Image (spheres, rainbow, N blue to C red):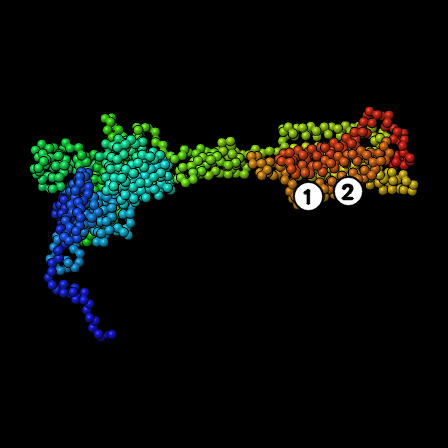
Amino acid sequence: MKGVKKAPLPCETNLKTLRASKVSCRLWTEPQMPILSMNGDFVIGGIFSIHSYMTSEQNTYTTMPPQPHCAGSMEFRQLRFARALEFIIHEINNSTDLLPGITLGYHIYDSCSAVPMSVKIAFQFANGLDPVFNNTEACLKPAAAAVSAFVGESSSTPSIAMASTLGLFGIPEVSHSATCACLSDKHQFPAFYRTIPSDQNQAAALVRMVKYFGWTWIGAVRSDTDYGNYGMAAFLKAAQEEGICVEYSEAYYRTQPRSKLERVANVIRRSTARVIVAFLASGDMKFLLEELARQSLPPLQWIGSESWITHPDFLRFNICAGAIGFGIPRSVIPGLREFLLDLSPERALKSPLLTEFWESAFSCSLKGRMGVQNCDGSEDIRTLQNPYTDTSQLRITNLVYKATYAIAHAIHAAICNNVLCDKTIKFTPWQIYNQLKRVNFTTKNGYQLNFDSNGDPVAVYELINWQFKENGALDFVTVGYYDSSKPRGQEFRMSSAISWVGGQTEVTVSVCSESCPPGTRKAVQKGRPVCCYDCVPCAEGEISNKTDSLDCLHCPPEFWPNTKQDSCLPKPVEFLSWDDTLAIILTVFSLTGVFMTICAIAVFFKHRASPIVRANNSELSFLLLFSLTLCFLCSLTFIGRPSEWSCILRHTAFGIIFVLCISCVLGKTVVVLMAFRATLPGNNVMKWFGPPQQRLSVLVFTLIQVIICVLWLKMSPPFPFKNLKLYMQKIILECDLGSSIGFWAVLGYIGFEAILCFVLAFLARKLPDNFNEAKFITFSMLIFCAVWITFIPVYVSSPGKFTVAVEIFAILASSFGLIICIFAPKCFIIVFRPEQNTKKQLMCKIPSKAFWHVTERQ
């Protein structure tokens, strides 16, 4: 209710009480002390995995847990990273260009390769080293960050834990070696940056390399950590997109039981893949190689990730000879070697870490431990051959160099103007985080650095190959490069020859199935990866014109595969050509028919005044002979390549000429019948069948066919047509009928006339023999009808050029039937039996002279 004072909550009362009182806060545990440290105006943190593990004891939950500490062997390479951070900060402090008048300090920690230790150190980076807070405000709100930013962690899993923690406070982490692609997610890790490329880039580079060398059947082994799992997942996804198959994918972590390591090693030994991609941290790779070296191992082509491919300790494993992989580019840091070697027993005693290094490196004791030989001062660090003193392969060390300089440039941008820097300026870690986004500089050794929106640098790798030197020892040789800033397809390039497994100069072959040659396609084997397949020949009418085709392609309709089925060739075009044997035979018969017809014309013309010629209606006979000549010649239009004009000509000419021919025969038949009708008393029918009427009837019958043909050509004329369906292997070039109705109307009209002629001739067959040609016309029409009735089913069922041959045969057969049956007997009498070619002979059996008088008028 308005005006009523609200009672304070209990928590608010307690808060006010706490603010009014003077209290002190104390942490429950002692802070972890840095292994290397130096005070300065601004402190940069560093965390490295210098020891291999952290001691842990059983927690009783009745007393405070003991302070954790590192154990195990010292990683000399990680120590070099830590001391490199020292060197770089001293170099920056001596610089007049970067942070002039400002002294940087450092707090360097050992994470013991353990996530709990990394998280504890992360909180110390946020809170500082003082376990007691003597003012109330410090107890109620977070203290100012103890470091401006820090370099580390060395691996992905602890980096994820630290970035998740310190990202809440905005304390930037710039890692030199954490490559997990997951760390590029700015929603989860907003303050994380790194100078090493993401595994997303490394996975893409590895897949590109595997594809480049033609490997489609590989094995895969990874660390069972965020680094290995995320990196291998990215690789397998990209590999699947490129058609690369993985026979097995095994995971291992060095703290897992030995039985797991043995199982992984046995899987590798039994596999058929000759290429193995190892996305392993160096510690896990060491255990795996030692296990594989216990028993004989088939020659394997190792593909390594950047974490171990340039690790000098692994050069002692000859089973990895010929290994290739992408490593960070090698570099030179001037002055670093002298700094690392500037170490004496006296200086080593000032730091527990350096004391441990000295005693481990020289196998002696600086503090006089029992059972260990004392160091006598003759030890010379320059004679050591270990990763700490080896500066010939400064790869990750250069990333520490770039990470430290990136933080220094960010601090410079936050507190300095063009000339001066103000050490009294107070800034929050978020300000350094924002300045890191805009960092863009070139280091003294010539390397440029800037971060993208995900906090990642441009991915640049060297392709490293393990080759034997002249003395028989393995060494790293750069044989290629990968640069993600290059245009797509140009990122990867080779620079020199590779020595493969076993010292071979030819690329190792690793495939589940041999490549399928052109003319075949892949058929995936059931239950196996897509890289395991059988080569199946392409089906009829299909080709594959490249190796390893997934599918066969159909040739275009007018093409057909060659015998190897690797290319399409134009289909042969088939038609009844002039040089075809069948066409030659038909042409000979056609010309023979023409010759016979011309001979008959010559005989009839020479003896045109003879009784037998005059008695058989000479005008219609000559017209019939002329039409038969055209019939024989018409058959020749069906031979040769069909064209638009030849298709029209062959069908229409055939229809019109045959109707003309049969019209003449029909006229002769009607004249014979009417002549005998005219011999009857009082019958004057022949005046209606005189020569004018005969000519008119032939013209009318023929004109009807002409009209049918004109309508056919008007509606849908015949045209050249490529028949692609009759044969798969060839094209039949033929004349399409256009309108089937027109074609069958032409044939039907010819058939109607032929049947009519046959019936009339049949009725006149028993008239007197000496002059009656009705019997011959009956036989000729019988042959004609038989031929064309047979023609129809044969024409429909004959394939290709034989369809045309059947049509030519029908034309020739029916034409020969007409000329032989009608004209051959008369020519025989005229030429060989002239005594029978008399008026008396023709009239000897006539009961009346009417027929002779009728025919004589013809």
Q: Is residue 850 left or right of residue 168?
A: right
Q: Is residue 855 left or right of residue 723?
A: right
Q: Is residue 325 left or right of residue 571?
A: left
Q: In front here: 613 or 293?
A: 293
Q: Quadrant of residue 577?
A: top right
Which residue sits at x=76%, y=36%?
782
Residue type marked 1: Gly
Rendered-image quadrant of the N terminus: bottom left
Measuring from the top left, give residue 62's x and y in whole percent: 15, 53
Position of 753 relative to 128 (above/below) = above
Cα separation, mark 2 vs mark 1, equals 19 Å
Please give the residue where the numbered disc 1 appears in the rendered image.
742
Measuring from the top left, give residue 494's x and y in whole percent: 32, 34
Q: In front here: 259 or 774?
A: 259
Please give the residue where the numbered disc 2 appears in the rendered image.
700
Task: First in sequence, mark 2 or 1: give its number.
Answer: 2
Q: In front here: 637 or 499?
A: 499
Residue 113 visible? The answer is yes
Rendered-image quadrant of the C terminus: top right
Which residue sits at x=33%, y=37%?
219
Q: Nearer the viewer, mark 2 or mark 1?
A: 1
Q: Quadrant of residue 787?
A: top right
Which residue sits at x=60%, y=33%?
574
